[in-house]
Image (cartoon, grey):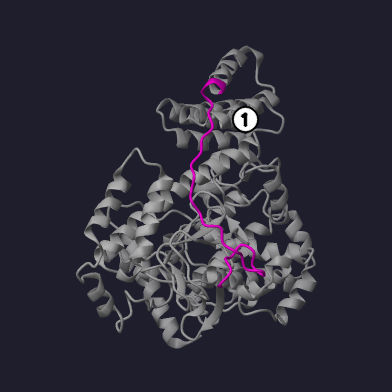
Amino acid sequence: MDRQHHETKMKCYELIAQSAAHRSGLPVATPGSLDAMLQILVANPHLLAEDADIRTYRTFVETNGHCFADPIYHDKPKCSIRAAEIRREGNQLYTRKLFEAALMKYNESICASPNESQDLAFGYANRSAVYYEQGFYDVALVNIALAKKHNYPEALMPKLLTREANCRSMQKDIRFPLVEVSLETNPKIPFLAKGIQGRQHPSQGPIMVAKRDFKAGDVILREKPMIACVSWENVFTRCNYCISTNLSHLIPCPNCATAMFCDEECMRKAQNVHRFECGVCAETSKMNDFWLGPKLFFHGLALFKDDITKMMKFCKRARGSDSFYNLDYSKYNPLDEFKTFLTAKSRRPGRPLYDNIIQFNAAIFYEIYMKVPLVRSIMASEEQKDFMQQCFVDYQIQKRNLTFRQDSNGHLYPIASCFGHSCDPNTVLLNELGNELKMIVLRPIRRGEQIHFSYGPSYDQGPEEHEFHLHSLGFDCLCDVCDPNKCYEWLTRVTQPSSIDAGHLAVVRKVVNDEELSYADKLNALQQFIQRYGFSHPQEDYAGVVLVYRGALTEVHTAQMNNAMRRKICG
């Protein structure tokens, strides 16, 4: 290990551990938290030694599991008594009109309910009451049907039937049109617009460049994740397979009390990986996006048809494309995509500063997964066990190097990861509620320009917030806002006198604030303005309109996603 890297890392660990230990007014770090892990690492210098390997960490975890174990995150069997207790907690939240929190508790109770038990009927009936209060009458009807299907008690049926009748009388067709330009797609990447080319930049890594002009409002990417994982706080509000919220309308895994899915299709698709984690999901989900490394390993193992020997042989001589944009997605082969994941180049340094935390997490995951009979049966030899644990480390590092945002829900969008970052982006990325990521052009993009979006930092943030997000990138930002050689010119253009027609600007502001106009009309007015005065960017008045447009797109996208999920739920 490079000595300077090691010394820098040691100082960082010590400072963060001290900060966590002495933070005033806050509780002591909880077991398994990042703060707790940092404190453990600093208190056990042999884990930070240059010769510490996967077995060093494995031995420590096997011996000191009590240091980071937390009973809250242990998977429990399905149980009617526990399901009823959780449901009562949901009822209390419902009474206080905390509907989202109540939904989460009702989902947790559904997950805890034994298969074919009446507890399932109670959970679905309670859920229908929440959807009724939220105005999602169509979704409420689906849950009423589920309650009936699971033998809802006849004595309570009149109340349920009254709610059903009320839902039918209140139902109406809800539409929220979003004006989107239909673009010709890339012949090899059908979910990417034609006219975008990937290339490797000497200092930025993979980037995407426009080979034609694009206008504000053009949707240039619609991508679903290659793999995803849900953090503990979202296990009862997001699908275990696709991480969609699906309006919290989820069905339980029949074999464990933690995983939930959008529907039978998501449950079926999830089995390639979920069979390796069923029964330990509570323990793995507490690790947030560190879970994605192990998920990627088992995803790969499934693609090799559970043949660990074959997978090991391939990984020893791994050869593949250096970027996802070279793959032919029109002939989608998930194994080729996985192999590319192993060899793809990134814009981040190959070794993260916190590599010991990744090693530590990998050892904890090893301990958890070895409880699963299927995993134990496949990982028979010590060499295979070492390989699995090392892959947990390597895949988490590679995932971190390729993903554009580090958040509690882990996900990997291969093509989106090829687009670069800018604090003054020309596109916006939308995917808060569902699993499909949508990239929309914010302002005119000319042929030859790089296409980018914000990985988190943005010029409209306050100085402290911007600095915080820049620090989380894992690489030096060299966009026009941050590059010392470009930022003065950028700031000069921001403050230059406006060349925008004042009358046109006033009209756009009036349209945006007119509550009688549709969102389609507002978006159309904003797009025309942004397109016409594109030459003004980043002048203050123009940039202000672009920010309003970004907010409008986000609001419309959220409504669109809600309606799309309602259509999916209700068939």
Residue at position x 64%, y 67% in the image: 189
Residue pointed to by mark 1: 142
Closer to the camera in the image, 255 or 16 = 255
Tell me the kind of residue under disc 1. Answer: Val
In the image, is 199 to the left or to the right of 527?
Answer: right
Residue 472's spot in the image, x, y percent? 40, 68
Does 477 appear in magenta?
no
Residue 301's spot in the image, x, y percent? 73, 65
Residue range corresponding to the magenta coloring? 168-195
Q: Is residue 170 visible?
A: yes
Closer to the camera in the image, 26 or 342 = 342
Does 191 appear in magenta?
yes
Name the magenta segment's main secondary structure: loop
Vertical position of residue 15 compared to residue 34: above or below: below
Closer to the camera in the image, 546 or 497 = 497
Helix, strand or loop status at disc 1: helix
> Which quadrant is home to the C terminus?
top right
Closer to the camera in the image, 511 or 439 = 511
Crowding at dot 1, Cα within 10 Å, few <14 / some 14-19 / many 20+, comes out as: some
Vertical position of residue 393 compared to residue 548: above or below: below
Number of on-image labels? 1
Vertical position of residue 341 compared to residue 87: above or below: below
